[in-house]
Image (cartoon, grey):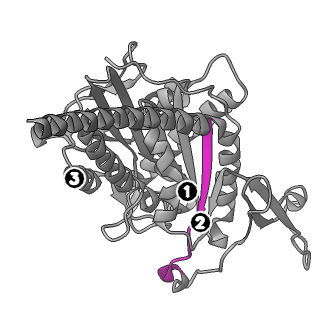
Amino acid sequence: ANERDDLQEFTKQQETMIADLEKSLQASNKARRALHNTLQELKGSIRVYCRLRPTLPSEEEQDNFKGEAEFGMNSNGERPGISLTTENQSAFARGGGPGKGQKREPVSHSFEFDQIFGPGDSQEKIFNEVEGVVQSALDGYRVCIFAYGQTGSGKTHTMTGSTSDHGLIPRALAQICGEREEMVRGGWTVDLCCSCVEIYNEQIRDLLAEKEDEACKHDILHDKASGEAMVSNVRWLSVSSVDAATEALRLASTRRETACTSRNAQSSRSHSVFQLRIKASNAKLGDKREGVLNMVDLAGSERLGTDHQSSKVLKEAQNINKSLSSLVDVISAIALKHSHVPFRNSKLTHMLSPCLGKDSKTLMLANISPLITHSAESLNTLRFAEKVNSCTLGPAKKLNAS
């Protein structure tokens, strides 16, 4: 009997010790989340990463291939730097062009960003720098990651990737699904659901819609309680596993509008917005949280004189450039702290307004092409990215869990 009592006492002590360790682990996780989010806030409201893609073998084989632009990278300063050397055009604009035998003076343009990735950097390396922002969505914040750049600069590859070399979206989904499994083991209930829409010629399309619902009209509605921009009549899919998320991505990518242009054999003709909503609760801890992860692959900016081959492609390009110009106007207004920000000038900026307003964590990936024939567009991208990096949205706040 004494031996049994001793064993019961020992078991009771072990159970108490395990309970204390679980409480300690939960407190540690809570402190980790707080420290992580503080670090993200200290890094800046809108973080900007720049990616210079490699030259493709198919580009080098083309008859009109003129070589690569002169880029330089520097990681010795306070922040990573990138420079692009172009020919000085201003000297000829006044006189109508260079005279015979006159040389064009090279000009170096330098920029600094939060991270810079070169042609040899892998998808995995880029995601390693992004996963902390993704983690914030699990911790109850609104997060937006978007790719910007000209047509053919590698935005869709960065965001979606391929079956053998996953981009940021499938890697983010794998991370969140893995974290959910850990949380469930710790007593949490975690629900995930996703939607994916495209903005094509200023019209919203549901890329996950059932066939009978494809003709539904979609409007952008603002939920005053959550501050979210909601798209009406959109199909939301439950994400029960990484496989379910991957299937949703595959379906959306096959339905997205693309066309062949002079810059890209399969150019995206729309802006796509993949949204993952996260609801988590732990009754034992009395903790509830809701987060939103927006992953945006913007259509590429284009020069109308060279990229369109039909009236359809021309109309697409005009709408793409108009919405991107609206994005530039919004960023400029935010950077200059204007009292009015023209979010409603396009469907794109209207839909992204919660991500570009207060209480959100936003990261932009500026994608640039290495080709010398794309230097003007690359410089425009770098200048816009610099402006985005100067925007201050204020400290992010957790979303109110319902």
Residue type for callout 3 = Leu
Disc 2 marks a residue whose amino acid type is Ser
Reading the image, the residue beneath label 1 is 150
- Is residue 318 in sight in this rendering? no
Rendered position, 371 above or below 378: below
- Residue at 89%, 75% (x, y): give it: 103
- Number of numbered labels in the structure image: 3
Q: Which residues are magenta?
A: 45-59
Disc 3 versus disc 1: distance between alpha carbons? 25 Å
309 in relation to 234, above or below: below
Can you give x and y, in whole percent of width and height, for residue 134 in the image? 44, 44
Residue 252 as seen in the image, left or right of residue 388: left
| Mark positioned earlier in the residue sequence (1 or 2) | 1
Helix, strand or loop for disc 3 = helix
Which corner quadrant of the image does residue 289 belong to? top left
Dot 3 or dot 1: first in sequence order is 1
Residue drawn at point x = 14 percent, y = 34 percent: 5
User: How dense is the environment of label 3, judged by Cα within 10 Å: few (below 14), some, or many (20 and up)?
Assistant: some
